[in-house]
Image (tube, rainbow, N blue to C red):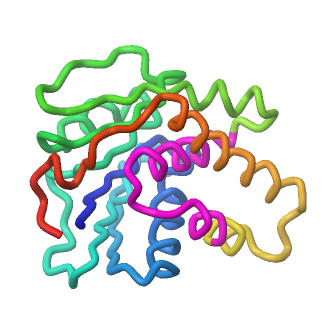
Amino acid sequence: MKYKCAFSGSGGQGAALMAKLTCMACITEKKQVVMTQTYGVEQRGGDSTGYVVISDQPISNPIVESDANVAVALSESIYQSTLDGVCEGGTIFVNSSMVKHTKEKPGVTQVLLPVSEMAQDMGNIRVANIIMLGAVIRATGMLGKESVADALASALGKKAKTQLLEVNMRALQKGVEVMEKKGPLRDTAAAAGLPG
């Protein structure tokens, strides 16, 4: 199975962290993985995307270019370019708290989740990305929750305050639960016709 992912957001939203955690979890699960990133020209607050390719086989091409089968758009400013980069049969997970104007793209499933509002309800707006990551892994099945939780604990480090780790773990679980309530999505890699 091959997943070509694009995690996109504006500065400070944690899109790059989502990509990093995905890579770390892949290593734990002994999957092949490669990550690249792009940034806007702004020094702070600009748009960025973390691209991750995951496979059970060696990865010959690490580029994700208009063929992502799993994508995330955390902000309005990067939504359109992220949607444009999703291939037919792919799925884009959209932070509907921030993205107010969605557009249809034939053959692309859009999952609208108000993750910023959910994070505020949890008392920490900064965990919106982790809620979204929980939703993505549950909907796609590309990674197990345990390996992502381990990656999260490792990324936060041993010096992280207990409360910080706890709220992030609850956020991950919240995202998983949201998608369990929504019901299953089809296998995005197979639907997109990507080889394993």
Q: Please check the rendered image and state whether residue 23 is part of the magenta-colored stretch, yes or no.
A: no
* The one of 181 and 28 positioned closer to us in this rendering: 181
Residue range (magenta): 126-150
Query: In terms of secondary structure, what is the magenta stretch mainly?
Result: helix
Describe residue 93's horizontal placement relative to residue 67 as left or right: right
Q: Please check the rendered image and state whether residue 135 is part of the magenta-colored stretch, yes or no.
A: yes
Coordinates of residue 171 in the picture (x, y in percent): 69, 45
Residue found at x 18% / y 37%: 84
Q: Is residue 43 above or below residue 186?
A: below
Residue found at x 21% / y 72%: 62
Q: Residue furthest top?
A: 101
Number of on-image labels: 0
Residue found at x 79% / y 48%: 167
Describe residue 46's horizontal placement relative to residue 132 as left or right: left
| Quadrant in which the C terminus is drawn | bottom left
| Quadrant in which the N terminus is drawn | bottom left
Q: Is residue 7 above or below residue 148?
A: above
Coordinates of residue 138 in the picture (x, y in percent): 48, 48
Residue found at x 34% / y 76%: 33
- Residue 107 position by quadrant: top left
* The one of 104 and 194 positioned closer to us in this rendering: 194
Coordinates of residue 27 in the picture (x, y in percent): 46, 81
